[in-house]
């Protein structure tokens, strides 16, 4: 009888430890994201919520982004698209609370709910798994106006008919 009681206690303890962090078991702490643009081969720079650059490359790109940003902090990112002749575009990447995090309540995982899932970021889930941004062609025109001074002998012949004498 005592052996079966000890065996049952060991099984219950092992089960509670295994299921103490529900979101950590079912979810992840980093998620893949695919980034594309039209036109392709745009430069992208990804910065975290502190403004630190964590990735630089070209579209199309696939990479993993962490879901957590410190204890009980969800990650936020800004993806900036740039390409010559197109307007710069910045798009946010957000995370939301993962439903599996509340599985800790059902399974009695106080350790998972208050320590493990918040520390690993597993309590958050990526909202957008794929970014496909259309870049708008720039309407700003670059005018290269110059002021040139010509000697009278260097003026093209077709211009000479339009010359006006200023001083006599």
Image (cartoon, rainbow, N blue to C red):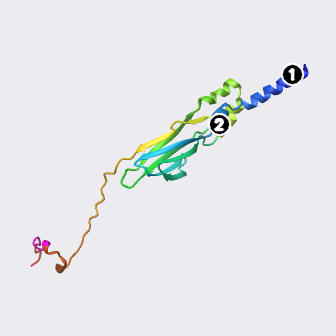
Image quarter where the C terminus lies is bottom left
Identify the mark at residue 162; answer none if there is no mark: none
Image position of 59 (left or right of 17):
left
Residue depicted at 21% across the width and 76% down the height: 150
Image position of 141 (left or right of 4):
left
The residue lying toward the viewer, choosing from 21 and 58, is: 58
User: Where does label 2 land, which residue?
Assistant: 118
Image quarter where the N terminus lies is top right
Assess whether residue 110 is covered by the magenta stretch: no
Q: Which residues are magenta?
A: 158-163
Task: Indicate the secondary structure of the residue bearing disc 1.
Answer: helix
User: Where does label 1 land, which residue?
Assistant: 5
The residue lying toward the viewer, choosing from 71 and 150, is: 150
Residue depicted at 37% across the width and 50% down the height: 87
Among numbered discs 1 and 2, the one appearing first in the sequence:
1
- The picture places residue 122, in percent across and down from the top left corner, at 63, 36
Considering only vertical position in the picture, is 22 above or below 83? above
Label 2 packing within 10 angstroms: few (<14), some (14-19), many (20+): many
- The picture places residue 110, in percent across and down from the top left corner, at 71, 29
Residue depicted at 79% across the width and 28% down the height: 13
- The picture places residue 85, in percent across and down from the top left corner, at 36, 54
**CA gap, disc 1 to disc 2?**
34 Å
Considering only vertical position in the picture, is 41 above or below 8? below
Image position of 74 (left or right of 137):
right
Task: Indicate the secondary structure of the residue bearing disc 2.
Answer: helix
Label 1 packing within 10 angstroms: few (<14), some (14-19), many (20+): few
Question: Mark 1 near mark 2, Cβ–Cβ under 8 Å?
Answer: no
- The picture places residue 93, in percent across and down from the top left corner, at 50, 41
Residue depicted at 67% across the width and 23% down the height: 106
């Amino acid at each position: 009888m005592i052996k079966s009681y000890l065996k049952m206690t060991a099984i219950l303890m092992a089960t509670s430890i295994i299921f103490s962090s529900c979101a950590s078991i079912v979810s992840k702490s980093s998620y893949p994201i695919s980034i594309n643009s039209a036109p392709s081969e745009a430069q992208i720079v990804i910065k975290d919520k502190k403004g630190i650059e964590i990735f630089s490359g070209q579209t199309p790109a696939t990479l993993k982004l962490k879901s957590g940003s410190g204890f009980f902090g969800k990650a936020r990112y800004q993806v900036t698209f740039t390409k010559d002749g197109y307007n710069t575009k910045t798009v946010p990447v957000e995370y939301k609370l993962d439903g599996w995090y509340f599985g800790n309540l059902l399974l009695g995982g106080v350790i998972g709910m208050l320590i493990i899932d918040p520390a690993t970021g597993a309590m958050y889930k990526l909202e957008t798994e794929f970014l496909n941004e259309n870049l708008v062609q720039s309407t700003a025109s670059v005018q290269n106006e110059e002021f040139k001074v010509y000697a009278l002998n260097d003026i093209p012949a077709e211009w000479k008919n339009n010359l006006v004498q200023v001083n006599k």
